[in-house]
Image (spheres, grey):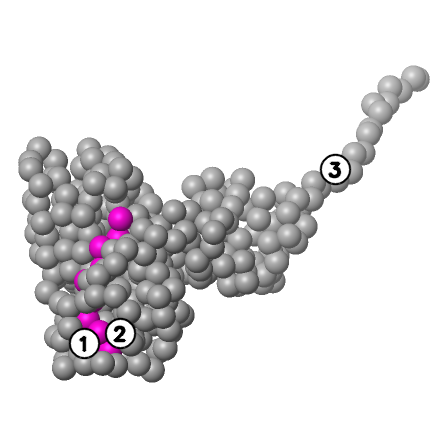
Amino acid sequence: MRHKFRDTYLFQVEPTFVRLDKELAARYPDLSRSTIQKYIKAGYVQVAGETVTKASTDVSDMATIALTLPEKQDTSGDTLPILYIDDNVIVVNKPAGVLTHSKGVMNDEFTVADFFRRYTTFGITTNRPGIVHRLDRDTSGVIIGARTDEAAALLKKQFADRTVKKHYTAVVDGVPKLEKAIIDVPIARNPSAPSTFRVDPKGKPALTSYEVMSSNGKQTLVELRPKTGRTHQLRVHMQYIHTPIAGDRVYGSAQSAPRLCLHAHSLELTLPGSHRHTFTAPVPSLFEEMVQ
């Protein structure tokens, strides 16, 4: 009797190894790779039950990978003083110490953007809802947000075209040599401290006008009008003329005031379907007290 036998072939499938951040990006397409890398570094990712903190770690495409998203702090009870609101925009008086928007996914502190999120449909899927311009964390004062995409487009164009008039009030250490002047010197990022800026002939054009309001001989109350909108422009320019803004721990002395004495006093621009409007936030009483 003849028997027929089937041939049996045994295959060993070799897993494909890729970088951990690339594998997670493929599994979580809604998260950017930079966001994923921050989660990995912070210890929110486990591979086969073990915490891995290096994004470059090679992992199998069949590995068990767990990503546990951090709980976001509840900021629903936090609020900001509203100066104006209509169907298109919202204007608030930002306190010193409040970020305009989150610096990244690991930052869960309350921001202006968190507040705007309750009132806007623009940028709602990002960490910058409603944001069309910004103020430094330690700067207080007027900031405007867009409530719709159409309003955002109009406001952004005005900032880009430099048709927005911005007036700041500040206290500076010392007394400027001239009561009124224009500072016209370019600014660039400081390569030795990338989060800061400095005057640089090869930098971007930056123009600021200032006027002395009052002084006690040691500190001076000034009005500043930036014609351009470079990051840290006012702080760098006032340092350049040897009268840094009081309380500026980066460009001056943190000991000369209890806070950075820079306040966005007024903002003038055109609202959607309307004429020019000027929004004003009262100057902190501390500023006047310091120069008495």
Image quarter (top left, top right, bottom left or bottom right) of the N terminus: top right
- Magenta stretch, residue numbers: 219-227
Chief SS of the magenta region: strand
Task: Residue 159: name its quadrant.
Answer: top left
Residue pictured at 32% horizontal, 56% vertical: 183
Tag in front: 3 or 2: 2
Residue 54 belongs to magenta span = no
Q: Badge 1 local density, few (<14 within 10 Å), some, or many (20+)?
A: many
The numbered disc on residue 13 is 3
- Image height check: is 253 above or below 147? below
Camera-nearest residue between 24 and 168: 168
Disc 1 residue type?
Answer: Ser
Which numbered disc flags the more N-terminal residue, 3 or 2?
3
**Residue linked to disc 1:** 215
Mark 1: secondary structure: strand
- In this view, the residue in front, 46 or 84, is 84
Task: Describe the element under mark 2 as helix, strand or loop.
Answer: loop
Q: Does residue 180 appear in the picture of this structure?
A: yes
- Residue drawn at (26%, 74%) of the image: 175
Describe residue 35's horizontal placement relative to residue 255 as left or right: right
In the drawing, does residue 157 fall left or right of residue 1? left
Q: Say which residue appears at 40% left-offset and 70% top-offset.
A: 250
Question: How far, Cα to Cα, is label 3 from label 2?
Answer: 76 Å
